[in-house]
Image: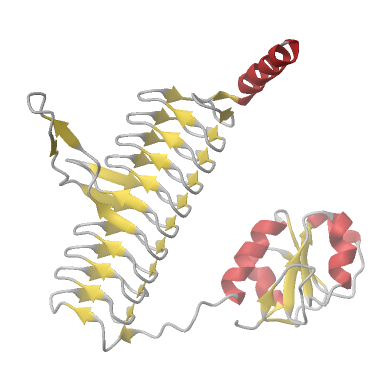
């Protein structure tokens, strides 16, 4: 981990420093596990004394803590958890990824790699690939023909990116994920009862600052495009079907599945194991609780409204239904 002074950290997170700004910080930790050189945070003044009494060298605290006199530097911020996350960007430097191509990697001579790209062991970079400055390709990853990857991306080990996929800048893709695979589209021959594959020749476009967890799959469009908007965060084991449109700053938890042509608005939040059927529309700001189910062609709207159950409905309505069922059960 890199060492920075408390003042450097305060300036970086746009916080206000109270105390000695020269104190060196080299790591982050919880209050319980902190040691000398660590930065910790508290969101409530009630926990400030415990944080100050820990072995940590500095504490991020809410602005209301400014009246407290402490032996350790305080970095005051309106959103301590957010400030702590930002501080980690300086203090938690990733493993040394020196620019260059490992001797065991296979890079097509027509691939276009920026000068400071890092390619690890046994990675395969195909014809026509373009990779921007500061991007890292992990061991065993396969980047197929004509893929475009922007600047400062992190592609972890054993990721597969199919031909023609486009990634923006600062995209993170974790191990085992597959981007741009064929969608699940078939046409049934009514005469024979057999299925024939519908063409899956569209595109996949992933915008800036998206993060995709491990062992996720995102399908290309059938004839058009599957798109993931800027800043969206997708957990492990999520499946995104063909032609799905996901807006900006969407959060999708593990084991969620989105069927073909679903449209997800900006700032939607989905809990784990949510099931979205085909041609569903989730409007901006809706919140889907864990294991919610949305039938085909339905529209969910309500910014800040929590939906639950299958079929999903506002949680107040869902809880009323459970209460009615409980009363009926007691009468039997």
Which residue reaches farthest front?
332
Residue drawn at 26 percent across, 86 percent down: 104
Question: Where is 167 relative to 257, above or below?
Answer: below
Depth order, front residue of 251/140: 140
Count the labels in the image. Answer: 0
Which residue reaches farthest bottom?
103
- Colour setting: secondary structure
Question: Where is 297 relative to 178, above or below?
Answer: above
Quadrant including the C terminus: top right
Quadrant including the N terminus: bottom right
- 106 relative to 210 in the view: left or right: left
- Estimate the x, y position of residue 306 in percent, counting from the top left: 59, 30
Residue drawn at 16 percent across, 65 percent down: 145
Question: Where is 127 relative to 308, above or below?
Answer: below
- Estimate the x, y position of residue 64 in percent, counting from the top left: 84, 54
Splitting the image into 4 quarters, where does residue 224 fall?
top left
- Estimate the x, y position of residue 147 in percent, counting from the top left: 22, 62
- 58 relative to 329 in the view: left or right: right
Residue drawn at 17 percent across, 74 percent down: 111
Residue drawn at 54 percent across, 77 percent down: 93
- Estimate the x, y position of residue 328 in percent, counting from the top left: 69, 12
């Amino acid at each position: 981990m890199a060492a920075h002074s408390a003042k450097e950290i305060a300036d970086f997170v746009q916080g206000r420093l109270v105390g000695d700004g020269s104190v060196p910080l080299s790591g982050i930790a919880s209050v319980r596990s902190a040691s000398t050189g660590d930065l910790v945070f508290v969101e409530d003044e009630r926990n400030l004394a415990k944080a100050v009494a820990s072995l940590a060298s500095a504490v991020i605290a809410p602005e209301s803590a400014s009246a407290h006199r402490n032996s350790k530097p305080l970095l005051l911020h309106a959103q301590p958890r957010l400030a702590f996350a930002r501080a980690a960007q300086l203090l938690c430097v990733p493993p040394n990824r020196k620019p260059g191509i490992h001797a065991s990697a296979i890079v097509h001579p027509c691939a276009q790699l920026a000068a400071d790209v890092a390619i690890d062991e046994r990675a395969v970079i195909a014809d026509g690939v373009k990779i921007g400055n500061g991007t890292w390709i992990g061991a065993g990853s396969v980047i197929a023909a004509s893929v475009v990857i922007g600047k400062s991306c992190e592609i972890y080990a054993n990721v597969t990116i199919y031909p023609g996929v486009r990634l923006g800048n600062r995209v993170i893709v974790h191990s085992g994920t597959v981007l741009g695979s064929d969608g699940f589209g078939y046409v049934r021959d009514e005469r024979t009862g057999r299925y024939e594959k519908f063409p899956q020749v569209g595109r996949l476009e992933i915008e800036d600052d998206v993060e995709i967890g491990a062992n996720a799959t995102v399908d290309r469009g059938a004839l058009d495009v599957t798109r993931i908007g800027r800043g969206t965060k997708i957990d492990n084991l999520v499946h995104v079907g063909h032609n799905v449109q996901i807006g900006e700053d969407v959060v999708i938890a593990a084991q969620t599945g989105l069927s073909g042509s679903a449209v997800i608005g900006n700032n939607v939040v989905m809990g784990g194991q949510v099931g979205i059927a085909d041609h569903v529309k989730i409007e901006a700001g809706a919140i889907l609780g864990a294991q919610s189910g949305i039938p085909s062609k339905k529209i969910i709207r309500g910014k800040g409204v929590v939906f639950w159950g299958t079929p999903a409905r506002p949680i107040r309505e869902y809880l009323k239904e459970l209460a009615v069922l409980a009363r009926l059960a007691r009468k039997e």
